[in-house]
């Protein structure tokens, strides 16, 4: 889910029930993104289906997300640090200057209540 995105289009899942690709049909032309998972079930990368370019990479430590790298295949990659709550759910991301670029809050059983900020986290 890209913050501010439309979220419309077909979603495909693998045999483990993980999102494996999504096509956003709101833009012209439509764009498809493949999601890559590791053996522990952690999302580790997103790649553009058309070009094969890496869009985002995710770094995990013992099942806990710790960093997101965006614009990886460009000359200006961006690093965000992921902050988690006591359940290891991401609640905030900060940039290199410690500025909050993404924030989420959850309902008691884990449903997302709000997401704010210009950064994206799938």
Image (spheres, helix red, strand yellow):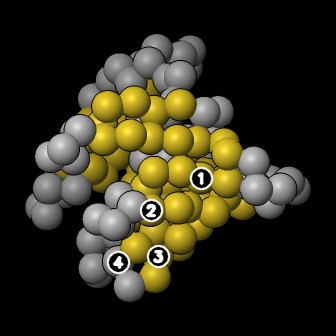
Looking at the image, is mark 4 or mark 1 nearer the viewer? 1
Q: Are marks 1 and 2 in contact (CB under 8 Å)?
A: no
On the image, numbered disc 1 is attached to which residue? 93
Q: Name which residue lies at 46% across and 76% down.
A: 60
Which of the numbered marks, if any, corresponds to residue 60?
3
Between circles 2 and 4, the one closer to the viewer is 2
C-alpha span from label 2 to label 4: 11 Å
Task: Tell me where residue 22 appears, x and y as whole percent.
Answer: 36, 38
Q: SS for tag 3?
A: strand
Image coordinates of residue 120 in percent, x first then y, are 55, 41
Quadrant assignment for the N terminus = top left
Residue at 29% in and 65% down: 87
CA–CA distance in space, label 4 to label 1: 17 Å
Residue for badge 2: 84
Element class at badge 2: strand
How packed mark 3 is, by other alpha carbons closer than 10 Å (few <14, some 14-19, many 20 or more), is: some
Q: Earlier in the sequence, mark 2 or mark 4?
A: 4
| Cα–Cα span, label 3 and label 4 | 6 Å
Badge 1 marks a residue whose secondary structure is strand
In front of the other: 54 or 117: 117
Q: In which quarter of the view is residue 85 placed?
A: bottom left
x and y, in percent, of residue 28 in the image: 56, 15
Number of callouts: 4
Answer few, some or many: residues within 10 Å of disc 1's Cα (few below 14, many 20 plus, some between 14 and 19).
many
In the rendered image, which residue does mark 4 sit on?
63
Percent position of residue 88, x then y: 35, 66
Are circles 2 and 3 on residues that touch, CB within 8 Å? no
């Amino acid at each position: 889910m890209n913050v501010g995105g439309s979220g419309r289009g077909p979603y495909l899942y693998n045999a483990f029930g993980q999102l494996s690709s999504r096509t956003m049909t709101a833009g012209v032309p439509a764009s498809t993104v493949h999601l890559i998972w590791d053996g522990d079930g952690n999302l580790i990368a997103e790649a553009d289906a058309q070009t094969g370019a890496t869009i985002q990479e995710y770094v995990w430590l013992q099942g806990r997300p710790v960093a997101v790298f965006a614009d990886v295949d460009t000359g200006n990659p961006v690093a965000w640090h992921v902050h988690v709550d006591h359940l290891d759910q991401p609640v905030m991301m900060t940039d290199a200057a410690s500025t909050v670029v993404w924030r989420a809050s959850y309902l008691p059983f884990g449903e997302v209540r709000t997401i704010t900020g210009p950064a994206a986290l799938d």
